[in-house]
Amino acid sequence: MKTWLSPRSTAGLIMIAGALLALPFLAASGGQAWVRILDFAILYVFLALGLNIVVGFAGLLDLGYIAFYGVGAYVYALLASPHFGLHWPIWAILPIGAFVACLFGMLLGAPTLKLRGDYLAIVTLGFGEIIRIFLNNLDAPVNITNGALGLNLIDPVRLGSLSLAGTSEWGALSLSGPQKYYFLLVTLAIVVVVINLRLQHSRIGRAWQAIREDEVAAKAIGINTRNIKLLAFAMGASFGGIAGGIFAAMQGFISPESFSLTESVMILAMVVLGGMGHIPGVIFGALLLAVLPEVLRYAVVPAQKALFGSVLIDPESLRMLVFGLALVLVMRFRPAGLWPSPERKRELAEVSE
Amino acid sequence: METLLQQLINGLVQGSIYALVALGYTLVYGIMGLINFAHGEVVMIGALVALSVTGALTAAGLPLWLAGALGIAVAILTCMALGWSLERIAYRPLRHAPRLTPLITAIGMSIVLQNLAMMLWGRNYMQFPALFPKAAFSVGGAHFTAVQIIMVLTSAAMMIGLAFLVYRTRLGMAMRATAQNSQVAGLMGVNIDRVVAAAFVIGSALAAVAGVMVGAYYEIAHYQMGFMLGLKAFTAAVLGGIGNLGGAMAGGILLGLIEALGAGYIGDLTGGFLGSHYQDIFAFIVLIAVLVFRPAGLFGEKTGERA
Amino acid sequence: MTKLTPLAVAMTAVLALGACGKKEDPKPGPAAGAAPALTVKIGHVGPMTGPQAHLGKDNENGARLAIESLNAKKLTIGGTAVTFELLAEDDQADAKQGPIVAQKLVDAKVAGVIGHLNSSTTIPASKVYADAGVPQISGSATNPQYTDQGFKTAFRVMANDVQQGKALGEFAAKKGYKSIALIDDRSAYGKGLAAEFQKSVEAAGLKLVATEYTTDKATDFKAILTNIKSKKPDLVFFAGMDPQGAPMVKQMKELGLTARFMGGDGVCTTDFPKNAGEAAEGHICSLPGKPLEKLAGGPAFRERFKQRFSADIQLYAPYVYDATMVMAEAMKRANSVEPAKYLPEIGKTRHEGVTAVIEFDTKGDLKDSAISFYEYKGGKLVYLETLGAPIASAPASEKK
């Protein structure tokens, strides 16, 4: 546990901290748009880490994870927008959002405890769709979610008197809205990463791992598999809820179409490609898949124009094609992901012999 | 009464579409315990190939019935080849991998096939040729068409044919042996690779038939047509007890009826609170309810846990 | 350290590529006469990829045509000759991409933005433009919330869903339909249109005998159509798009449901009769604005568009063309390309466009929200009439 704070690691941590501090300014030199892209990338890191608890640690395949993100986003939007005339502060809403998402996580977990693998996949997928359809239709008889039209004019995050929207200046230091969100997100992300690291090596983390490897054996050695599985769903969901809240605040507008099945699959792809159960791997997977489309946007079209003189394949379809192929190829040749944890790599190497 | 009869017909027809697709899922699952998530995409490829071939041949001057028959044949062959390659390239290397691995591969293949189809056929909805006679019938105020009858009959025939194959032929015996215990079956001289490949090829041929039927029924085809259909059919297969041929049929028809009657009557029963806007979730709610009480589905046998 | 490496590599790559991408864009204007002293950048955003790419491209072509004809006129604004330059961006019709792309345009210091195409991207993006004070005119975002936010920078040159739904209801009443069934596809578009249609027909004293729902991905409507049939309506109103509308009319026919079918601009497309076949006959749909053929510049515009891009107008290109023209005219009147200076002039617009006479109300919506109705005859759209505005380009003040 303590080994990663060796002098070498400390130096590494300082460098990471320095890089994280410099990044938004570096990105801003290419335009504020890059800072926004960075913000979304961190949001995906959040989501991927949350899903990693369920899929990576506990081995429960969840195809409806985006539902919790949606729940968190709607909780924020309802409590901080003109829709109900409520404008609660963020420190009150984010915990509520996390809690509500957590409840939904248990709601999903409870009936599916007995199910495994494939059955669980289809039920969670169905659950995700159910949530989306409810968000889309709960505008009558009582207008709660405003249906497909979505919720608009959601308050930006305010910390005391500081609003995170718009540019603020402190003497020579000027921070744009996206840059301020970046610092909020990075702070929260560090907290989440630390929680995850601690969880992984805690009793609970080991219990999850035991369930992932062999549920019957885990039960036999006295692990309360029911509670431990529920806890995985609940914890994963609450991270999704927090991410959703910040998404709503950053966007200012949300509608159910942002929470579709494709997004669930996308987050799953991040976890799987990066390395299920391995936190640095998952972070890498999330950053890679969040930034890759932007790279493709800039690279694919000019490259094709240069090569063929016209755009033969549009970047959007290429992006999805690359995702699909990547999933297949990684499963085939690196089933533990691009950056797997050392022990997982060893296990899989043994299996495939 | 007239409305109820019509809704029953609607449900039966919709249900036999689900059943037709569900048979393919169940066949593969029964033998290897793998959900072929890409099955819905194979259905879509079948429909689009039939559409293109039929279109090209009618444009070349062939009569519609001949062009259609050739279109169906080419679609079936293409899908069989596709099913075989899927198994060979994507799934076979993973047969001994952890459980999640082939499932994620299947999701990946589904994305790949969808995007390839989009590049080949474009994004627009295309008109599917009307392959079957346009006859319409009316009984007791309820309307139905020839295509609908053909569709129900095709599903039933496919199920019976498949049951014959599984329970009356040598290949079927090998399939059942593999499903029971593939290692022992292998020791007894069953060529596992060939049996699994056969299951994929047959399942994909069924998917092609389903694709053509769906296309001919709605007279519209699109690169995303397989996805939701695949999900619903998979739900139907699980509902009936996945791995069980009769269960897939029953699950499909049950699901079709639930949707039709749900959309038809729940709205009135709940005073408009739960109307047809919740049509798509009836299926999932029933599925969850069934699985909570019968984790192996309605007709599934309680086999050992296949985790 | 390890955490930094992949990210840093990705970022550098991204930044480098970003720089390459931008170098491609600037194209010198027609260098026939005097060298242009000032280049005015106008942004355009729509989905260039994804399922609506064809509509996005159509919009971009509309803007491009406007820019080219403006440049051909060799305008002088504030004493200097100006050349307009179009910065076309892709938002993938994805709500997340909306603000990112908007930020990109603001970073590039555009004088104004035409777009976006979808309401779901236009609304989150409009906040970015409003914060930066950049005027935005959309040619196709019809969700009322877009202009309800109170942003001074947000305009649109197309009737919103409220205006269209209202006109559709009035038309149904005028045509003497008595009992009406409503089908809503629960998309933002369908919901807005359905709600206004319902208000409008109920205000006219008509009865809504059934309300059913579907989705924008469904293909089977038999269950809901059977329900509708049991209520015996004489008109079925569908608030949704043609991929659902076309199979829907076919299934109506199969079920022996003989009511007339009516819808908004979503089913007023060339694909609808193509996919519905003869089942489309006699059905009614509406398009915002006036038919191109009835307007002074209309047929010429259609011709010009076809010549320039060797493609037919898909749907919204004329509206986007008008939007671009409105923006340029405001600059001319203000004699400035500074957003802060010409923005007030946009509100005072009175422009005879190819789709309508454009005047804005205080919110930035069209004052004169003409809606035209068409019927499918022999697989073609046949013009019926226009509600909400006089047809000739007479002063628009006589009717609201």
Image (tube, helix red, strand yellow):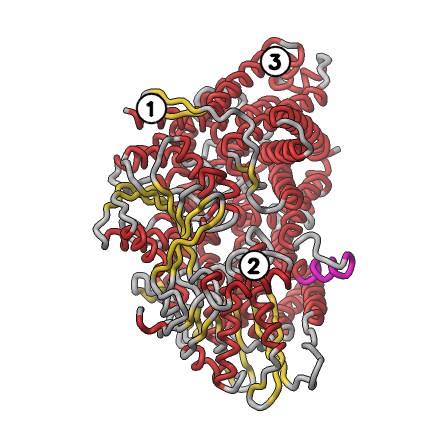
Q: In which quarter of the view is residue C158 placed? A: bottom left
- Looking at the image, which is closer to me, C81 or A334? C81
- Looking at the image, which is closer to me, B283 or C59? C59
In this rendering, position of residue A129 left or right of residue B64: left
Disc 3 versus disc 1: nearer the observer: 1
Which of the two labelled residues, at mark 3 and mark 1, occupies the earlier sequence position? 1
Task: Assign the N terminus of chain C to one quadrant of the image.
Answer: bottom right
Residue A239 covered by magenta stretch:
no
Residue B134: percent from the left, percent from the top? Answer: 49, 26
Q: In which quarter of the view is residue A42 placed? A: bottom right
- Looking at the image, which is closer to me, C57 or A304? C57
What residue is shown at x 38% (from left), y 37% (from top)? B279
Q: Which residues are drawn in magenta?
A: A298-308
In this rendering, position of residue B250 left or right of residue A10: left
Task: Assign the C terminus of chain C to one quadrant of the image.
Answer: bottom left
- Looking at the image, which is closer to me, A120 or C70? C70
Residue B4: percent from the left, percent from the top? Answer: 31, 26
Q: Chain of mark 3?
A: B
Three-letter amino acid code of the residue under disc 2 = Gly
- List the residue tagged with mark 3: B165
Residue C259, compared with residue C71, is above or below; it is above
Report, in whole angstroms, how far the alpha carbon at label 2 lies from the one at label 3. Answer: 51 Å
Q: Can residue A65 be seen here?
A: no
Secondary structure at numbered mark 2: helix
Secondary structure at numbered mark 3: helix
Numbered circles on residues, count: 3
Residue A191, compared with residue A234, is above or below; it is below
Q: Chain of mark 1?
A: B
